[in-house]
Amino acid sequence: MDVKKRKKIILIMLDTLMDKPFQKALKEESLPAFSYFLEHAQYFPEVVTPFPAISVNVESTLITGQYSDRHGVPALVWFNHEENRIINYGTNVIELLKLGLSKGIYDALYRLNNEHLNPSVATIYEDLHQAGKTSASINALVYRGAVPHQLKVPGLIRFFLNMKESINTHAPDEFVYGKLARLSSGRKYSCIWNKYGFNNNFSVQEFTCLIKAGKIPDFSIVYFPDHDKNVHKRGPMDVKGIKEMDLQLKKVLNAFPSREQALSENIWLLMGDNGQAVVGDSRENSLVDLRKLLSPFKISKLRKGVQAEDQIVLGMNLRSCFIYSLKPEAVPLQKIAEVLQEDSRIEMIAWKEEQYIHVISGEKEGKLKFSKNGNMSDEYNQHWSLEGDPHILDLTVEGKEIQYGNYPDGLMRLYSALHSHKGNYIIASVKPGYEFIGESTPKHNNGASHGGFHKDDSLIPMIVAGTSTKPEFMRIVDLKRWILNLIERDGDYNEATAGKIKSNS
């Protein structure tokens, strides 16, 4: 095949696109761009995200093809045992101010990609570079590649914070990270009130530069972040952001000589990144305050950092939370779990002991424990050993076969989260209708939130145009291998060769 006619792969990640509101919008609104893609596409309504369903974890899983036990980015907020501090990539300004704004911004700008994302696990960008292929990351938060780049820190940020003008990093060939790393010379959509370019319009502006210049790489990820805030505020069935994304997709299509050429020369993957579950309107009932639940224990304060007398640290991730015991002999995980179990709003409480993971619930009686590599298998050909009540995780067991209900791929997603980083910790998740809150966390009562273990948080749709193939399993963790296989079919990509860079690719 003529190299110039090989299909490029364009993955557009549409933050918080969910099947039910998408179907509603298709029926009630005019969505010409989405409709055009769907006329020529396969549609998969239920693709499983990693847990917690938070952007940095989702993107890390997407580009590495591994869950967090391998890629090492647990969530938006987690406790770094070695540094004895909370890592927060950006929940809100108040929390970052309490934790140290300079440190928090540097975590997000540099450490996330260059230190926290496991260097021994290859990203798709690194694999493609090794194979002589090109790639692009447009506004994605997790982007590590093999090509040196610089982030140019805006002057206003440097005026208030002690930060260098430029930060060296490694990314794909074509790299956009808001105003800090850009392709176009236009200043539109990149001002401070536009979140320095971290918005849908800026993503469209930068990617259409590549289209019009005829420089679309072999593989691109283009991130549209805006719809998340609409759903947080107005609830899961809000369609305003979907209509806006359709207009922006139309601009992308119109950058090609024709729509027919856009589809014939490229493979398109349009997908969400996480779902969101409704949060009730009652602040008192819908917002589960962990400080009150865990009041028998001494909880570390954000501004003070970990003190000698502290017993617990909270890693708040909206509808889920990492709860760390700093003194496991005096405050064992099981003791914390028993306190949490008294609240019926908490649907899942889990912790690990040696090779086993223990799971209990505030809404169900009983207990389950499981481990890997047993004589039972699930729908993803993963093998497990189960003891206790499988209904705790809404599992259906028939003979040696396990099927998932409200918690898709629940065993592996929970296993990976509990092996994602060092420390003695519990993971807890609330039912739909509720959200965890802590010292200064965002509150989304009468709206929606994500990060939970439930399928409402964990299933996203995917539109695939330009190929009749599909991933082996409908999970984000399986997309990397499928994409590399698509590229291999049109070119000379050799997965064995790529594996020589990083043995865990």
Image (tube, rainbow, N blue to C red):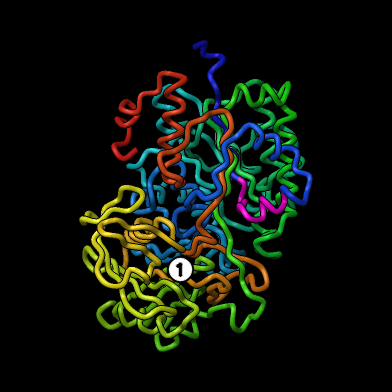
Question: Of residues 442 and 158, which is closer to you in this image?
Answer: 442
Quarter-wise, where is residue 263 in the image? top right
- The kind of residue tagged 1 is Gly
Magenta segment includes 116: no
Image position of 74 (left or right of 331): right
**Rendered location of residue 274, percent (x, y):** 55, 54
SS label for mark 1: strand
On the image, the x and y values in percent for residue 92 come to: 60, 64
Residue with the most extreme bottom position = 296
Measured from the top left, where is residue 137 in percent x and y? Answer: 55, 37
* Dot 1 crowding, Cα within 10 Å, few <14, some 14–19, many 20+: many
- Residue at point 71% right, 64% down? 234
Asked if residue 464 can be seen in this view, the reply is yes
Q: Residue at horizontal 49%, vertical 82%?
A: 291
User: Please, is residue 184 above or below residue 475 in the view?
Assistant: above
Which segment did they paint magenta?
A: 14-25
Residue at horizontal 36%, vertical 80%? Answer: 365
In the visual, does 7 lie left or right of 407?
right
* Picture layout, residue 112 above or below residue 358: above
Residue at the extreme top of the image, as rendered: 2
> Toward the viewer: 432 or 244?
432
Q: Position of residue 53 (x, y in %)?
A: 50, 57
Any part of residue 226 in sight: no
Q: Mark 1 sits on what residue?
A: 315
Q: Residue at x 25, y 80 (%)?
A: 329
- 83 or 283, which is in the foreground? 283
